[in-house]
Image (tube, helix red, strand yellow):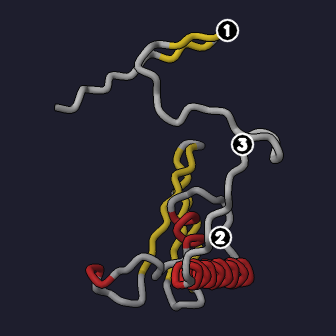
Amino acid sequence: MDTVVVVVFTYMAHRLQDSALYLCQVIRARRIVEPVQKETYKYEFGNIPTEWEAWIRGKRKDPPTIEEILKNEQMRLEVSARAQELLQQEKHQQSLPNQPMKIQIKGHASAPVFSKDTPSEEPTSTAGTFEPGSWNPQKK
């Protein structure tokens, strides 16, 4: 049996092993991670960079370079900094006193608005619209 083994150490000292077993023209890849911390229950998300996890799971063909990992980590830090800045701006906006609401002008600004504020008890119908009548109980 022919076996190819590639061992890579990441910048965080994880040992990654890639071995491909060639059996009858079928390539079966096996990728193993040996973390720095031997206790698996201490694993937390982010201990292994996502680029390495994608390579281990076979989602990408070539292992990531250190430059790629550092560039992506820098981008993640920038995005989280922008998110924190946005949250601070939202908190600042909420702490300000409420601004007076703008008056909504219906129709032309100089023309008076002719509309009924109270619904009619009788149903009304105009060209293409129908408005059912409202029920107002009599007060005793």
- The residue carrying mark 3 is 106
Q: Is residue 66 above or below residue 119?
A: below
Residue 139 sits in quarter: top left
Question: Are the residues at dot 2 and dot 1 in contact (C-beta closer than 8 Å)?
Answer: no
Q: Residue 63's mark? A: 2
Residue at image x 56%, y 57%? Answer: 58
Which sits earlier in the primary sequence, circle 3 or circle 2? 2
Please state if 107 lies on the left or on the right of 25 as rendered.
right
Q: Nearer the viewer, residue 89 or 81?
A: 89
User: Is 51 placed above or below 138 here?
Assistant: below
Image location of residue 8, percent across then percent down? 58, 81
At mark 2, the secondary structure is: loop
Question: For the C terminus, which image quadrant?
Answer: top left
Residue sitting farthest toward the left: 140
The CA span between labels 3 and 1 is 21 Å
In the image, residue 73 lies at what x, y percent?
64, 82
Q: Foreground residue, 61 or 23?
A: 61
Between label 2 and label 1, give the one nearer the viewer.
Answer: 1
Which amino acid type corresponds to the residue marked 3 in the rendered image?
Lys
The local secondary structure at tag 1 comes to loop
Q: Who comes first in sequence, dot 3 or dot 1?
A: 3
Marks 2 and 1 sit apart, C-alpha to C-alpha, by 70 Å
**Could you say which disc has been placed on residue 90 in the image?**
none
| Residue underneath mark 1 | 127
Nearer to us: label 3 or label 2: 3
